[in-house]
Every structure is written in structure tokens, then in C-alpha cells.
Amino acid sequence: MTYWTNEDNVAGKPGTALFIILPTIGCYRFSINQACYMCSYPTAAPKIKWSQEAIVDYVREALKMIEGKKGPFAVRMFTSGSFLDNRELKPETRRRIFELLAQMENVEEIVIESRSELVRYDAVKELVDIVSDKHFEVAIGLETANDDISDVSINKGNTFDDFVRAAEITHEAGAKVKTYLLLKPIFLSERDGIEDVKESIIRAEPYTDTFSINITDIQKGTLYERLWEKSEYRPPWLWSAVEVLLWAKRHFPNKRILSDPVGAGSKRGPHNCLTDHDRKIGRVIKKFSATQDIGHLEKLEPVCREAWRYIVEEGLLDWQLLTW
């Protein structure tokens, strides 16, 4: 089963999100050996292609998890690629899925994902018209506003200008924009990773309704994994995530700032000193995301914080930290 529910922020207030991984063929860039360096999601795509009818039925089955229940609910649909890619989902399939969502009064928020170059006015507008009374976001993977980092450390295949164009099209069509940013791509120190996210938030803020800070974890079969295995890359410290989230919410209080620290407290995920406190920080980050209350982050005990602070202040690189 690749759908589940979690406590989350729904259209600006605490609620529950239903996450649905749609069984499409996955990102087209993966098929031409141009995948992002940190991403292995397309490897999870079905080996046998599903029919468009079967995908609609799959969504209908997933929605039964929240059918008739008290909300508010958000429905967030991922494809290991782009929801707006006609190779993954035909326009008629997208419409039918949104017609199902339009009928559910307890669903107040809908989020889909798309690469910048696949965002088209007509494709977004027809979905907006179906769910015009709901909070509808198109999530775009900017990752960083620095084109050099995007090229060298991520292999994104998009520029900041591409993101701006896609965001403007999305707003013109009547939907909102969620911007994904990656905390600490490879070849950046801990300090540089923090500063890159902050600078990216400043540049992307005029075009963004919601920021989602994706804290890098190590996915199998990726360049990130190969560097991590050689002790040439370390996932970001959880204190770095806390620093970014606090800074972002204080500087842009009217923006929704979200983060889901996948693998928090594990060697492959964001971690501090690999103690039980790491997992607590992961839970607190999720609580902050649901409530947007920075008080949850401000009350954290400073376990391992001095070690993190030293690494950041000295600008140490990962290969200098073999014992951390």
C-alpha cells in the first residue's frame, strides 16, 4: 500500500494529510539517464505499466481512508515524476482524479508535484476550475536558487528563471505555489548548505506561497550514496534544519514553512550525534510544520548543539569530519 495519513498543516491550520503515491512510469529524466543526483524515487515506479483507468481506481481506493471522516484533510499526490506530465497521467485522468476530490467536502487542500518545464497554463487552469473552492498547490522542485549548485550538485536540469516562469503561470491560472528547497546538496559545507537555503528563500519568496524544506537523506543507488559510503558526504545536521526553519518563519511569518525530516536520527538521514534526542527533534519539526508555532523548535534541549555550532562556524567540509 503506497498511501497513508499523517498529522500535517492543512490550508494553514492543523489537520491530516493523505499521501498517495500514484503508480505512474515516473520521471522522464530518469529514463534518459538525467536523474537528479540525490533521487531514487523513479526506481520505485511499477515495472509493468498501469492503465490510466487503473490509476483512477487506485486513487478512488486510497480516498476511502478519509471518506466520511471529519477533516480538515489535505490530499497530496506524488508520482515519482510530474503530475502534469502527459506521459505519466493523461489530461482526462487528471480531470477524473480532481472530480473525485471536488466531491469530498472534508478535503480542503490538494497538492500535486511537477517539474518547472511541465507546468502549462491550460493544464493547471482546468484543474483549478474543478476544485475552485479548495486550497490547490502545485509543488515545484526548485531545490536551490543558485544555478551553479543546481547544475553541479543536483543535476536538476532547470534554472531559477525556469522556476519563476512556472510559478507565474501557476498563479495566473489561479493555483498556489509550493517551493521545494534541498538542505545541503553535495559539495557544500554545513555552513554553505544553510546559507544556500536562506538565500534561495529570499529569492523565491515573491513567487512562493508555501516553502517545503527537504532535508537531504541518502537514497539507494544515487551519487549521494556513493559519496556517503566514501565518507565524502554527510547528511545535514538536524540543528541546521532547525536553524533554517526558525530563520524562515521569523523572516517570513506569513508564509507556510513545512519540513518532513525523512530518516531523522539515522545514519542515512539528517542527524546530530545519533542519540535518542535526534528522533525527538524529528518529531518536533513535524509538530512545527503542522502548527507553524516556532515555540516547539525554540524549546528544544541543546543536545550536541555546540559540536554543530563549531562545525558551522569553522566552515568544515564533510571529508574533514570522518568521525562525526
Image: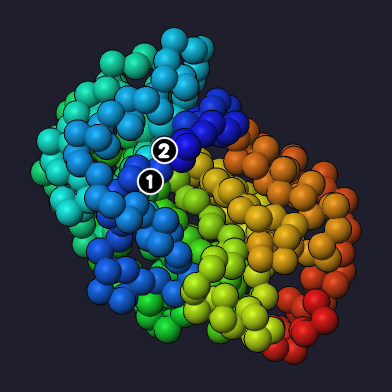
Q: Position of residue 188 (x, y in %)?
A: 58, 81
Instruction: Tell whether 129 sits left or right of 263.
Output: left
Given contact means CB atoms under 8 Å apart, are the residues at marks 1 and 2 in contact? Answer: yes
Looking at the figure, which quarter contains the C terminus?
bottom right
- Displayed quadrant of residue 205: bottom left
* Label 2: how many Cα within 10 Å (few below 14, some 14–19, many 20+): many
In the figure, 172 relative to 244: above or below? above
Where's residue 26, x and y in %? 31, 56
Q: Decide if residue 287 is on the left or right side of residue 162.
A: right
Q: Residue 20 carries which label?
A: 2
Q: Where is residue 264 in the image (x, y as percent from the top left)?
A: 69, 55
Res 78 label: 1
Q: Position of residue 253 (x, y in %)?
A: 56, 43
Secondary structure state at the residue bearing disc 2 = strand
Q: What residue type is labelled 2?
A: Ile
How far apart marks 1 and 2 lie (CA) works out to 6 Å
> How many dots with numbers?
2
Which mark sits nearer the N-terminus, 1 or 2?
Answer: 2
